[in-house]
Image (tube, rainbow, N blue to C red):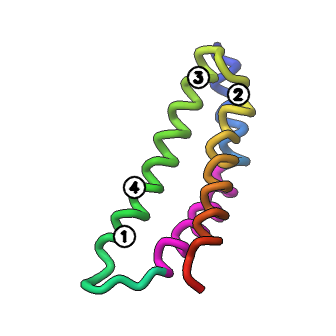
Amino acid sequence: TNLVAYQIEKYKRFAYPFSTFILTIIGVAVSSKKVRGGIGAQLGAGMIISFGYILFMQFSSQFAIGGSLKPMLAVWLPNIIFTVVAFAMYKMAPK
């Protein structure tokens, strides 16, 4: 199990830079909507999505440590899912 933790850390070092781009696209899509009364809801939505990504990354890492998922899949699964979400939100965002 110790080897799995090192593999997860290795894959996270490659996956986290991609998450920066993914979460930036989501942030652009969320912030493109103009809302009367301030930007509080947009900031809140952006923070919830970011925390959701971090939480999902931690859950999937624990599944890899437990042996349910392969370490590479566990680390890249949040990026894959949030990439789909990012492109869907970008397509629905007002231009």
Q: Name the residue under label 2.
A: 71
Mark 1: amino acid: Leu
Relative side of 34 to 22, left or right:
left
Provide the secondary structure element on which disc 1 rests: helix
In this picture, is 16 found above or below 6?
Answer: below
In this picture, is 81 found above or below 67?
Answer: below
Q: How far apart are marks 3 and 1 (CA)?
A: 30 Å
User: Which range is magenta?
Assistant: 16-32
Provide the secondary structure element on which disc 3 rests: helix
Q: Which of marks 4 and 1 is nearer the N terminus?
A: 1
Q: Earlier in the sequence, mark 3 or mark 1?
A: 1
Relative side of 40 to 46, left or right:
left
Provide the secondary structure element on which disc 4 rests: helix
Q: Depth check: give the residue in front, 67 or 83.
A: 83
Q: Mark 1 points at which residue?
A: 43
Residue 18 x %, y %: 69, 57
The residue lying at 54 percent from left, 25 percent from top is 62
Q: Pointer 4 and pointer 3: residues touching (CB < 8 Å)?
A: no
Q: Which of marks 2 and 1 is nearer the N terminus?
A: 1
Residue 34 x %, y %: 41, 85
Q: Mark 3 points at which residue?
A: 63
Q: Earlier in the sequence, mark 2 or mark 3?
A: 3
Q: How far apart are marks 2 and 3 (CA)?
A: 9 Å
Q: Mark 4 points at which residue?
A: 48
Q: Depth check: give the residue in front, 87 or 10.
A: 87
Q: Earlier in the sequence, mark 4 or mark 3?
A: 4
In this picture, is 8 found above or below 14?
Answer: above
Asked if the magenta segment contains residue 20, the reply would be yes
